[in-house]
Image (cartoon, grey):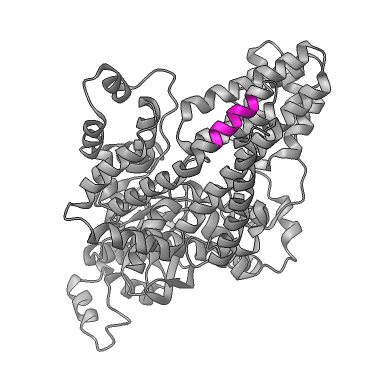
């Protein structure tokens, strides 16, 4: 059961849901850290977010006491704007703590155990009924968004007009159970659910929704009451938007963001510029970064009255570098489209966040330099003398790296289009992952540069019959020993290429540890690796520039997660041994000839 719990949690840890979605655990970790649980969220066995149970229970007790006290005051009529506002915030944080307690592995284990022993129904039937009950408070659009998050484990599309599913609910052609049935029959659901533990993941999603519903309804009501008492409080609107998003009422959340922007614009019209800037700063600090480019009107109004530098300061102080750059580019485009070309140019020139690089920035810069992905690699020289801890690099890459994994045995039409657009031959990938005596014979002939010197297939069979089968168990081993190279067909050019560069890395997974070999190839400016797992067969290809993995088999969530973990460990090894790796690959000699 514990292994299944980890698989269920892993489904959510590898899916990038909306930052306020109930299924997203990163936002929960951050929120709990803000509540004083930073130390408890560092070291983890489950999802790197193993929060100590006693710490959560202690904070829950604290908030429950405050909530009871405020609730008593409100019932007596001794209520004020600040009382409603504080009560709403307390209830919101209590929701996060309840979710944190549920996501502890032992709690999920208990939940799943009770779920299966108390019913004779299939888990899918239990899920569909319970999901509809947990989302009964949502309108049709929000319900469809939740179905997308829970059943397909991805963000819903951001559409202005109702899509076909929503329209079918509005017209009465479908009820909600029918819509779920249609989603279950979709190709996307069928492919994803084949990964394993998908139904268990759906069960945890609707249970988390039920937990959220317990306090969020009251939290939303408190923020709305605070707004009734002070309609110009953009701070209350911001908190209301957060509670609505976690409650699943996404369409209402969008309305509150528009209201905040309108409050700020009204402050500008009343010449209360400093208050408008303060509203703008709070909006940036509390709203998810992806919302900021969707509602640019307040930013544009401030820029039009000559406060561009103040706007830049707000973004620089409130956001991380990647978010700042994204918003910088979006704002420059919006300014140019609004006729403010000079302001757009100034924005691009001045809106440059300068922060001391953190470890993650250093690790990424070094990794990109090793694979010729930096446009300017001079800054890497600054890191030459750094002593990088392997464990720190492993933790960073395991938590931050995201890979696109393509199973060559489960190729979809979309996969083929994606691969073709990258200029990669999937046929070459498939051929290279086979253990082919015929191809090794061709490679040997190519190396000798004479058909008469070709090794006969029978000789390969003799090689396989020698006593040390662990050393020469696969056809490619002979050429490695004979010519000190490993060969393959370049997936970019179709030429034969060879490499004598490999990196043996100790990989740790749920099944133990072993040495995984990464054979480095360079062709037409592209750097990629063929991966051989400890048991010796060609297992995968990794393309760093695209963060793309081709693998033979990915039918279980364990395979996908362990592969991602192993690649991240490899990246950490390369970065922590940067100077040695840099020297080693500088000696490369990789010839190629046409097949």
The answer to whether 81 appears left or right of 135 in the picture is right
Viewer-nearest residue: 17 or 100: 100
Q: Residue furthest bottom?
A: 467
Camera-side residue of 265 and 131: 131
Find residue 332 and report its horizontal and vertical position in percent.
67, 23
Magenta stretch contains residue 222: yes
In this view of the protein, can residue 16 be seen by the observer?
no
Asked if residue 87 can be seen in this view, the reply is yes
* Residue range corresponding to the magenta coloring: 219-227
Task: State the residue lying farthest toward the front.
Answer: 76
| Residue 129 image offset from top left, x and y in percent | 25, 42
- The answer to which of 350 and 16 lies nearer the viewer is 16
From the viewer's perspective, is 539 left or right of 544? left
Up/down of 361 relative to 530, above or below: above
Q: Residue at x 69, y 23 (%)?
A: 230
182 in the magenta segment: no
**Percent x, y of residue 517:** 43, 70
């Amino acid at each position: 059961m514990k292994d299944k719990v980890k698989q269920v949690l892993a489904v959510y840890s590898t899916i990038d849901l909306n930052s306020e979605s109930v299924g997203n655990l990163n936002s929960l970790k951050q929120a709990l850290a803000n509540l004083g649980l930073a130390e408890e969220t560092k070291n983890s066995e489950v999802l790197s977010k193993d929060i100590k149970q006693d710490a959560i229970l202690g904070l829950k007790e604290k908030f429950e006491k405050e909530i009871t006290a405020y609730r008593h005051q409100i019932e007596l009529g001794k209520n004020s704007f600040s009382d409603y506002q504080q009560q709403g915030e307390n209830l919101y944080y209590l929701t996060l703590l309840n979710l944190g307690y549920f996501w502890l592995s032992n709690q999920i284990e208990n939940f799943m155990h009770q779920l299966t022993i108390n019913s004779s129904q299939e888990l899918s039937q239990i899920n569909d009924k319970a999901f509809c009950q947990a989302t009964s408070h949502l309108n049709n659009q929000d319900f469809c968004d939740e179905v997308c998050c829970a059943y397909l484990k991805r963000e819903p599309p951001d559409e202005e007009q109702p899509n076909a599913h929503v329209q079918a609910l509005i017209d009465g052609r479908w009820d909600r159970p029918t819509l779920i049935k249609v989603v279950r029959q979709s190709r996307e659901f069928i492919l994803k659910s084949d990964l394993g533990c998908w139904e268990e993941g759906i069960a945890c999603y609707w249970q988390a929704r039920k937990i959220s519903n317990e306090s969020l309804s009251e939290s939303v009501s408190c923020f709305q009451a605070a707004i009734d008492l002070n309609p110009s409080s953009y701070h209350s609107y911001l908190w209301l938007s957060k509670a609505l998003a976690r409650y699943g009422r996404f369409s209402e959340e969008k309305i509150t963001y528009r209201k905040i922007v309108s409050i700020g614009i009204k402050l500008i019209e009343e010449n209360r510029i400093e208050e408008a800037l303060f509203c703008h700063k709070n909006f940036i600090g509390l709203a998810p970064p992806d919302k900021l480019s969707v509602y640019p009107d307040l930013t544009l109004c401030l820029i039009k009255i000559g406060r561009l530098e103040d706007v830049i300061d707000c973004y620089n102080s409130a956001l991380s570098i990647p978010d700042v750059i994204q918003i910088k580019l979006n704002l420059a485009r919006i300014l140019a489209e609004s006729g403010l070309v000079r302001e757009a140019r100034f924005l691009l020139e001045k809106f440059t966040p300068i922060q001391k690089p953190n470890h993650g920035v250093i690790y990424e810069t070094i990794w990109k330099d090793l694979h010729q992905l930096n446009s300017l690699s001079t800054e890497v020289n600054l890191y030459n003398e750094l002593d990088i801890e392997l464990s720190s690099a492993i933790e960073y890459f395991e938590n931050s790296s995201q890979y696109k994994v393509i199973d060559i045995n489960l190729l979809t039409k979309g996969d083929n289009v994606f691969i073709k657009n990258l200029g990669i031959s999937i046929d070459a990938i498939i051929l290279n992952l086979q253990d082919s005596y015929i191809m090794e014979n061709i490679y040997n002939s190519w190396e000798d540069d004479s058909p008469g010197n070709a090794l006969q297939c029978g000789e390969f069979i003799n090689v396989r019959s020698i006593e040390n089968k662990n050393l020469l168990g696969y056809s490619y081993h002979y050429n490695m020993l004979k010519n000190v190279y490993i060969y393959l067909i370049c997936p970019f050019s179709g030429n034969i290429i060879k490499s004598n560069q490999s990196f043996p890395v100790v990989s740790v997974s749920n099944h133990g540890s072993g040495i995984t070999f990464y054979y480095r190839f360079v062709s037409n400016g592209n750097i990629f690796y063929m991966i051989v797992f400890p048991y010796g067969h060609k297992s995968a290809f990794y393309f760093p520039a695209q963060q793309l993995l081709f693998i033979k088999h990915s039918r279980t969530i364990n395979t996908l997660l362990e592969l991602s973990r192993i690649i991240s460990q490899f990246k950490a090894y390369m970065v922590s041994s940067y100077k040695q790796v840099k020297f080693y690959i500088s000696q490369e000699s990789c010839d190629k000839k046409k097949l």
